[in-house]
Image (tube, coloured by chain):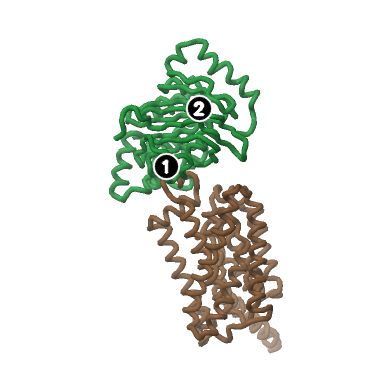
Chain colours: A brown, B green
């Protein structure tokens, strides 16, 4: 039959498209896990200390290079992820104590602080170059066995990273809702002066937020380095845009929003790069930021208060 | 307990401001135990700056702040909270994004769980209206309910001294009277010492024991509130001169 001959290739084409969609969503979930991890750290620190930390991307690169160094010592990759995360957490506290807090005390405006963090980020990147050189680096192939489920083909590494992210997010949720420290963090984020008048030492809470933020940042940097073939010192600053997109999408300063935002940005950019030129991934991320700010500046989960903070 | 002569709160020759420019210029005042002291004055007179300096939020250039005789000059707000100073800011006086009950829990942050529950019950006995609104988000409350939540929140730590920054600032004249009569006045009956900053001078003096008039960063009048209210000349100073002075010194505080 002449009709069947024409219909068959079209059917195959359609199946291929569906398969591509399913597979790219799978990749998107895997990429989204790393994004969510990074975005939650970014937004947590912003929500509590009210400082937009642009050096976050560079701290992520620091994490990736610390990971490279430790892998060279023969340590297990997942142990490296934990130690590297904690080390970047410590760097983040030093950045807060040594640079940000003194400037805030002197009364520097939020805009000035943004410039300071941009500069700190550039300095950090060139510290990496000075120590490790500008060359492209790789963790080697750390993907492990390939797993098939739900029509997705994912590597063991991607699944482990997803699981680590889920565990960390659950842990963060329990911390914020069930513990005294979590309550103090929420109070500090909601209204700093009022939190202090409740007897909460908000500068200590800030330190803890910078530490947790840096830890998430470092772990995300190492997770990213595991999942991509190669990287250099610009790894984190390139990744900063989709992370900010995820944070804005979820509502800046809202950890739960950043979790969902990370997933959405991960899936959207993965699907878009499956059907469209992957080079446009950043365009998609920027597009999400701009559309969100136009349509609903407070983000999916943000409160008006958080938006005021962003705009203040 | 402190002796009868030691006031709950005392400020001596306080000079404070932003940069090197003193907005508060040598202010002394005393809040005795269980009394309400009202600080009135026009916009820009330095009322808020005086409070913020006492609370460690604005830099003190010279002078001292004593809490029950103990020097707490420049102490950070969280330490003052632990020492028994309850501060209700003029704006942003509640945690907007939290429910009323969560605001109270946050107010009792320093207490353990059992103590916090006990305090919530006590505070709700003082403000029974809040009982029906415990699960409302603070941002949905009316002006009066909001101020009630704010005051209830600081009472959670059972403070010795309450510092209220223009509690009636965003309220209608009728509501202002209600807040001052029904929320501020009873505080002294609970044995609290209250420092009340108000622009609505007469309404504030009606619930106060002592009155201070602050003009251009200096104490112009300091007298018993009843005396000021009874003396037409003094009333004139508090009421009549205030608007003129406001026009003269208006500007960012």
The residue located at (36%, 41%) in the rendering is: B156
Labelled pair 2, 1 in contact (Cβ < 8 Å): no
Image coordinates for residue A43, horizontal then vertical, percent? 55, 59
Q: Nearer the viewer, mark 2 or mark 1?
A: 1
Q: Which mark is residue A33?
A: none
Using the rendered image of the protein, determine whether residue A151 is visible from the camera's viewpoint: no
Labels in figure, total: 2
Q: Residue at x 32, y 46 (%)?
A: B116
Among the 4 quarters of the image, the one containing residue B34: top left
Return the x and y of residue B164 as percentages of the image width and height: 46, 33
Subunit that carries the residue with mark 1: B
Residue A51, quarter of the rendered image: bottom right
Q: Secondary structure at mark 2?
A: strand
Q: Position of residue B240 (x, y in %)?
A: 57, 16
State the residue position of label 2.
Answer: B198
Q: CA distance from mark 2 to mark 1?
A: 22 Å
Frontmost residue, B195 versus A275: B195
For disc 1, the marked residue is B80
Residue B52 vs B212, above or below: the answer is below
**A288 or B144: nearer the viewer:** B144
Q: Are dots 2 and 1 on a single chain? A: yes
Q: Earlier in the sequence, mark 2 or mark 1?
A: 1
Classify residue B133 as left or right of residue A128: left
**Secondary structure under the numbered disc 1 in the rendered image:** helix
Using the image, determine if residue B121 lies above or below residue A283.
above
* Residue lying at 59% horizontally and 80% vertically, measured from the top left: A19
Q: Residues within 10 Å of mark 2 (few under 14, many from 20)?
A: many
The picture quadrant where one finds residue B191 is top left
In this image, B20 relative to A279: left or right? left
């Amino acid at each position: 039959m002449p009709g069947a001959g024409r219909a068959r290739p079209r059917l195959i084409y359609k199946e291929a498209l569906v398969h591509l969609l399913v597979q790219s969503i799978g990749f998107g979930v895997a990429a989204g896990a790393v994004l969510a991890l990074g975005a939650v750290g970014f937004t947590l620190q912003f929500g509590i200390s009210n400082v937009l930390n642009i050096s976050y991307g560079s701290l992520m690169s620091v994490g990736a290079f610390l990971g490279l160094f430790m892998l060279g010592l023969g340590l297990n990759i997942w142990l490296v992820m934990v130690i590297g995360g904690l080390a970047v957490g410590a760097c983040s506290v030093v950045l807060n104590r040594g640079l940000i807090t003194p400037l805030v005390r002197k009364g520097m405006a939020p805009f000035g602080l943004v410039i300071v963090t941009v500069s700190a980020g550039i300095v950090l990147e060139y510290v990496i170059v000075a120590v490790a050189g500008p060359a492209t680096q790789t963790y080697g192939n750390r993907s492990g066995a390939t797993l098939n489920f739900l029509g997705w083909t994912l590597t063991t590494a991607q699944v482990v990273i997803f699981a680590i992210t889920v565990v960390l997010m659950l842990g963060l949720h329990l911390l914020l809702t069930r513990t005294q420290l979590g309550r103090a963090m929420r109070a500090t984020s909601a209204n700093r002066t009022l939190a202090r008048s409740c007897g909460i030492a908000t500068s200590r809470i800030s330190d803890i937020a910078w530490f947790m933020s840096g830890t998430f940042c470092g772990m995300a940097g190492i997770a990213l380095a595991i999942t991509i073939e190669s990287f250099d010192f610009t790894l984190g600053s390139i990744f900063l845009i989709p992370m900010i997109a995820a944070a804005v999408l979820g509502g800046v300063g809202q950890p739960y929003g950043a979790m969902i935002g990370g997933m959405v940005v991960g899936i959207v950019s993965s699907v878009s790069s499956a059907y469209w030129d992957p080079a446009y991934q950043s365009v998609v991320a920027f597009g999400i930021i701009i559309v969100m700010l136009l349509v609903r500046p407070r983000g999916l989960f943000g409160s008006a208060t958080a938006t005021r903070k962003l705009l203040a | 307990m402190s002796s009868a002569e030691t006031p709950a709160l005392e400020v001596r020759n306080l000079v404070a401001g932003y940069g090197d420019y003193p907005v508060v210029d040598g202010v002394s005042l005393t809040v005795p135990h269980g009394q309400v002291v009202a600080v009135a004055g026009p916009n820009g007179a330095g009322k808020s700056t005086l409070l913020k300096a006492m609370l460690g939020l604005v830099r003190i250039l010279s002078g001292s702040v004593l809490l029950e005789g103990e020097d707490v000059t420049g102490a950070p707000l969280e330490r003052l909270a632990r020492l028994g100073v309850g501060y209700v800011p003029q704006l942003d006086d509640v945690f907007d994004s939290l429910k009323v009950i969560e605001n109270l829990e946050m107010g009792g942050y320093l207490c353990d769980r059992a103590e916090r529950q006990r305090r919530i019950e006590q505070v709700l006995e003082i403000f029974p209206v809040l009982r029906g609104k415990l699960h409302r988000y603070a941002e949905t409350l009316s002006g009066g309910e909001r101020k009630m939540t704010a005051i209830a929140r600081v009472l959670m730590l059972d403070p010795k001294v309450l510092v209220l920054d223009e509690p009636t600032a965003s309220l209608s004249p009728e509501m202002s009277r209600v807040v001052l009569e029904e929320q501020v006045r009873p505080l002294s009956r609970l044995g609290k010492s209250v420092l009340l900053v108000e622009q609505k001078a007469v309404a504030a003096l009606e619930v106060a024991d002592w009155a201070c008039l602050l003009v251009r960063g200096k104490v112009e009048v300091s007298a018993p509130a009843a005396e000021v209210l009874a003396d037409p000349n003094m009333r004139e100073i508090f009421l009549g001169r205030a608007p003129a002075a406001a026009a003269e010194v208006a500007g960012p505080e």
